């Protein structure tokens, strides 16, 4: 697949994520809408997966590509969770929530898997 075909989805998706995150922080939607965190982690994983696929522009989908993409998404997701934990400990002083962290990582990986499916569907056309 041509790299240029992923530029528009990458830009649109990151703008959507930034806009929703800005509004969610401004209007406290993360507290009011329990499902928004779910959506944001899925979209974030999707974006990171697409970014990886854009950077390495595979010719075809293989098991190795799927593994590398999901590993990259997991690596970024773990980094984000460490950042969240540090911010929570220092600023908010909330206790660590293992289930929330695990759910966030699963959602990140689900978004990354969706990025692979998106690329596969684009290649079929």
Image (spheres, rainbow, N blue to C red):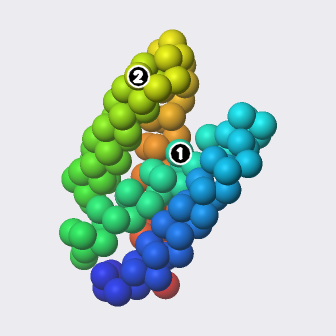
Residue 123 seen in the figure: no
Is 120 rendered above or below residue 7?
Answer: above
Residue at screen point 46% across, 44% down: 108
| Mark 2–mark 1 CB contact (< 8 Å) | no
SS for tag 2? helix
| Residue 77 placement: quadrant | top left
Residue 89: % across, % down: 43, 19
| Disc with the residue nearer the chain's start (2 vs 1) | 1
Q: Residue at x 54, y 61 (%)?
A: 18
Q: Nearer the viewer, residue 17 or 46?
A: 17
Image disc number at residue 41: 1
Q: Nearer the viewer, mark 2 or mark 1?
A: 2
Rounded to the nearest angstrom, the CA distance separating label 2 from label 1 is 22 Å
Q: Is residue 12 visible?
A: yes
Q: In the image, is residue 112 above or below residue 13?
A: above
**What element does badge 1 sit on?**
helix
> What's the residue at 49%, 66% (across, down)?
14
- Residue behind mark 2: 90
Q: How many marks?
A: 2
How many residues crowd mark 2 within 10 Å: few (<14), some (14–19), many (20+)?
few
Of residues 118 and 101, which is closer to you in this image? 101
Q: Residue at x 53, y 70 (%)?
A: 15
Q: Nearer the viewer, residue 110 or 41?
A: 41
Q: Is residue 67 positioned above or below 1 on the image?
A: above
In the image as oriented, which residue stretches furthest toward the front?
91
Work out whether residue 50 or residue 11 is closer to the camera in this orientation and state it: 11
């Amino acid at each position: 697949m041509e790299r240029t075909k992923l530029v528009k989805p990458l830009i649109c998706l990151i703008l959507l994520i930034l806009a929703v995150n800005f509004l969610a922080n401004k209007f406290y939607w993360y507290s009011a809408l329990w499902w928004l965190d779910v959506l944001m982690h899925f979209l974030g994983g999707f974006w990171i997966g697409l970014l990886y696929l854009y950077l390495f522009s595979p010719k075809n989908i293989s098991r190795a590509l799927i593994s590398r993409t999901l590993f990259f998404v997991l690596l970024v997701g773990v980094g984000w969770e460490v950042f969240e934990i540090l911010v929570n400990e220092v600023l908010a002083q909330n206790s660590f929530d293992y289930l929330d962290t695990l759910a966030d990582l699963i959602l990140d990986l689900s978004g990354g898997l969706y990025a692979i499916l998106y690329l596969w569907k684009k290649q079929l056309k």
